Amino acid sequence: MPTLVRRGQIYARRREPERALEAFSGAIDLVPDDPDLYYQRGNVYAITGQFDLAVEDFSLAIVRDPTHAAAFHNRATALADRGDLDAAIGDYTESIRLNPADPDPLNGRAAALSRKGDYAAALADYAAALALDPTSHRLLFNRGNCYSAQGSYTEAAADYTAALALHPRNPRAYVYRAVCHDRLGRPDDAVADLSAALRLDPQLPEAFLHRGRLSAAKGEHERAVGDYTQAARLAPADAAAYNLRAVSRAELGDPAGAIADLDRAVALDPDDGGPVFNRGLIRARQREWAAAAADFTAAVRLSPEDPLGLLQRGYAYLEMRNPTQAVEDFTAAIDLDPTAARAHYARAVAYRHLGEYALAAAGATRVLELAPRFGAARTLRAAARLATGDYAAAVADYTAALDLAPDDPAALNALAWVRATCPDAGVRDGPAAVTAATRACELTNHELPGFLDTLAAAFAEDGQFDRAVEWQAKAADMVQPPERGEYEERLAEYRAGRPHREAPPGDSPPGDVG
């Protein structure tokens, strides 16, 4: 029997688990009441991931020796590995009672408590374990993990630093400290730690992945793609590297490569809504609206509590000229997050597309309650109010929007159009219209015919009909039929010495903010 035991131990050290199991089983056949034989075979089962069999053997060892502290400890570890944390904590507690001078069961119980989210109890166990073994880099590393899990990144970084002082060749301590540096707003320190980890172990995919994220955050997408490529090479079954590389490839102007990466990520992890959502974003950027909407539909199915899928699908429906469906999606997004100003704004835009101007104005008002400096909401509300004949309120909104962004060409153009063409004489102001329209055209290099059209209307309202004719003729030359007809009608008005007047409510002004 001693020969079989020694043989089992040798095979276990050589990482030949099948032979080790055979040897220990043979020894158990000869001496079935020896608890250490079950304990040693249980260790082999645990190493090979056969946790149920490991638990069974440790239990047989404990039955034969209820004071076997190591068997309680290792059964606890096997229970934790298979996800039975409460039972694991019970076994660690018994191991601590049987051998209170051993820091290992305290360490194990702390890790299990941390996984359950009981960080205070876990930290108390780590403190007790470190009191028994204050120079254990493993305990410091694990306590750092606990601090990090509860969001105490300063304390976590300090523990990783202490662990590295005791064991400087631990690459994972550098990786985890890098995560803390990143969360604490120290990206350069994080990159330095990740590079140090990769010098120690160039085969760490998570180090490449984290460093790629940091490079991407700084806009260094070529460098990020290089790191993501290494991560994908080392962990080809991990969808994250393909997903993130796709984002950087898209930023580098490679939508085909990005889509290929996202197809791969979706194939690897079809239950993750992130890659399919990102694929929808890239297809939307390519103006492939139907395909984008299909991807956002999949994202909504996979992540039904995330309003972003609904929001982006709503944008796609707007582009597909389906504002009714867009309103439904934006409303569903608002139901998930009632404080999302973007969703309220998008729904207001959709209402304007539907001609529901009162709802559009109300939606824009809600946006401004949530985000008072959301300038586009003011121009949207102005356009909605203009469409209902509330001209003075529209001018007030355009003016307020320009207070926030004085060089917003769309707002300048819209304000100038109202000042030049409003049917309400009390709102019209020729000089103010000329000033706003001139600035809008300067900001757009006189390249937008709609803005030149407004400039011509402003000059006409100011009585400068020669200049109105000059600019209206230029605007008309820049547009194609049938739109040119409207431009030529206004040109005829100016040649006849008549300023243009918009009809009362119904028509939308130039500078559509939708």
Image (spheres, rainbow, N blue to C red):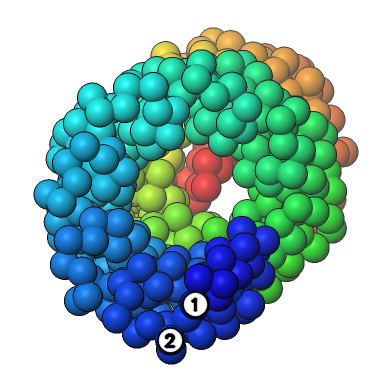
Left or right of residue 214, residue 431 in this image = left
Quadrant in the rendering for residue 143: top left
Image x and y of residue 355, in percent = 41, 59
Give me the disc on residue 342: none
User: Helix, strand, or loop for circle 2?
Assistant: helix
- Label 1, on which residue? 1
| Label 2 vs 1, first from the N-terminus | 1
* Residue at the image position 39 percent from the left and 22 percent from the top: 135
- Frontmost residue, 386 versus 460: 386
* Residue at the image position 72 percent from the left and 15 percent from the top: 442
In the rendered view, would you say 321 is above or below 334? below
In the rendered view, would you say 167 is above or below 264? above
Name the amino acid, label 2. Answer: Leu
- The answer to whether marks 2 and 1 mark residues whose Cβ atoms lie closer than 8 Å is yes
Image x and y of residue 437, in percent = 62, 20
- Frontmost residue, 157 versus 296: 157
Image x and y of residue 469, in percent = 77, 26
Q: Residues within 10 Å of mark 2 (few under 14, many from 20)?
A: few
Name the amino acid, label 1. Answer: Met
Left or right of residue 210, residue 447 in this image = right
Inter-mark Cα distance, 2 to 1: 7 Å
- Label 2, on which residue? 30
User: Helix, strand, or loop for circle 1?
Assistant: loop
